Image (cartoon, rainbow, N blue to C red):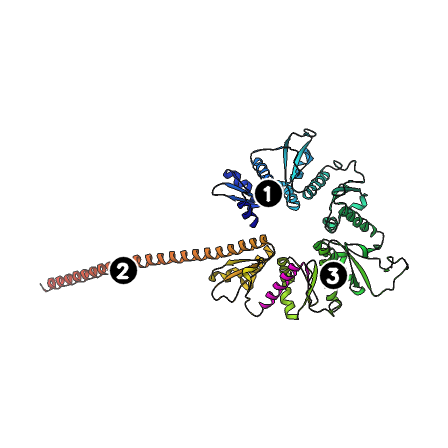
Amino acid sequence: RQRAVMAARNGEVDKLKISNDDAAFILGKNGKTKEKIARVSGADIDLYEHSSELEIRGTDAERRRAKRYVECVMAQRVGPVTIEAGDGDDDLTCIQVPTEAVGFVTGAQGVFLRQVEEEWGTLMFFADFRGRDSGRQGETEKLAIFGPRRGRRGAELKVMCAVETKMPGFFSKHAEDWEDPNDDWGTKTLVLEPNELSYALGKKGMTRRKLAASSQCIVEYVGFTVHLSGTYKERKKAEQYLGWLFAQLKGPVYVDHWQERDDCTMLEVPKECIGYVTGARRATLGKIEEEWGTLMFFMSTNMRDRDSDSQRGRKDFDGSEQLAIFGGARGRRGAELKIMSAVETKMPGKFTRDIRKFTSDEDGFASDTYPMDESELAYALGKDGATRRKLANASGCIMEYVGQVAFICGTYDERQRARTYLKWLLKQRHGSVFVDDVKSRDDVTIVRVPSDCIGYVTGNRGSSLRNVEEQSGTFCFVEGGRGETEQMLIFCHSARSRDVAERLINDLVDEKLRDERDYDRRDSRRDDDYDRRGNDDYDRRGDDDYDRRDRRRDDDYDRRDRRKDDDYDRRDRRRD
């Protein structure tokens, strides 16, 4: 929002007039196409449907990219997209797709391409090119991939993998081990044996994903060829991790000089807890690796002291084994705390016996500890850990409970937010919470909620509000201490997440007010119907009944008179 305002002040705004049909196409289902264009181009895009005007804000390069993407999307509506190739296409990658595989790559109603776009933050479509070699005419079609370099490469490899599935050997027929000489960014290829591929891929691609996440390198298998794309350091890590995976097939693995590595954390796990931490068929470790983007395995079981030049052979066994955790600093710390929490469940006090409350003054990545009693822990954990995850997502901080101690890890600002959110949460057990510095905070959005809608917005036992928090990754509560004023506070480090929560809350308010209006209209209609039926029907029934009674009374009276007259005449005749 601030960037959009600054751009408008500096005149960095481009406006496009578009038709209603194009506006609907650019917006897409639930606005996803517009969001995708904005994400890939880096520009802010606003579509005003009442005037069919598109506003694009950003730098010159961002606006230029956004306009190009908008024009391509609009062209898709009426026919094939034609792209004018230029020398400055630093945001474009083209890949030749065999004609027989185009439908497979596109997927039903474009589902596969949309999934790849979502995963890698790209914009993709088949197109005709001018000014470039058209390729093998009639045999292939060109797929254009727009976006940043890493995203384009990831999407390209995904498409190559799909084509290889449909047409084995199309890309990998002449594949061999090779490495790009570019140290800044490049690709390394390794050809695997058929029996190695299934192990390197893992169940539903889990092993491939953890290799990519832990090394921060793009890892994709095209046939039997592994493509490692990234910087030289990232490629080297991915190759090492892949080698350790294959080494585990032959026996325990030990990493020499692990203390000197900047991508490794070592954790001592008691022997009694190894099975509990590992899980059946390594399910628990696999789940933690998937969550935190790490690679973990236990070091050699004989605990060899191979890092010491002066001493070889076995090291005295101390009843524990070393769990090696590889990955980024944040991921390693999150995985380490998950393992510590599991061990603490099995052996209370193992890691928290001497832990006290501690707050680090470090500006960079560090850890704070916050001990709690049993009642506080149960409240701060929530059902299935939902409350803990909510606080972690909203603060942008790693938060894990090891025993009864909350470990809060992140930068100084992240840790400060997490501590504050945790204190507010615990205060809610005893009553309403009042935030003194709400107007000076940059992590809050205030939503005014009518008093008669608060109950509907929060839901039964807070269920509706918990659903909003879960969908948006925020921490929300109704502020107390302001008398009759009802204002919902939405806390999160991400402004985009707060916007999502604000929209969801406003939707709930509108839904409540709409139901009330419908109820009032039904009541009013019912009253009107009752009044009409009551007055008119009563008058008509009253008059009609009165007339009928009068007519019956007159008829009876006439009949009685006639009978009397007849009797009188008969008596007179007999007398005569």
Please say if the residues under marks 1 and 3 sit with CB atoms less than 8 Å apart.
no
Secondary structure that dominates the magenta span:
helix
**What residue is rendered at 32% in x and 59% in y?**
534
Above or below for 139 versus 303: above
Q: Is residue 424 shown in magenta?
A: yes
- Asked if residue 427 shows in the view, the reply is yes
Q: Report the span colored magenta.
A: 406-427
What label sits on residue 59 in the rendered view?
1
Q: Earlier in the sequence, mark 1 or mark 2?
A: 1
> Residue 415 has which mark?
none
Task: Return the residue at label 3.
Answer: 339
In the foreground, 9 or 262: 9
- Cα separation, mark 1 vs mark 3, equals 45 Å
Q: Amino acid at mark 3?
A: Ile
Answer with mark 2 or mark 3, whichever residue precedes in sequence.
Answer: 3
Inspect the image, locate mark 1, and give the three-letter code of the amino acid beneath it. Answer: Thr
Residue 225 visible in the displayed image: no
Q: Nearer the observer, disc 2 or disc 3?
A: 3
- Mark 1 and mark 2: span between their CA atoms? 81 Å
User: Mark 2 = which residue?
Assistant: 542
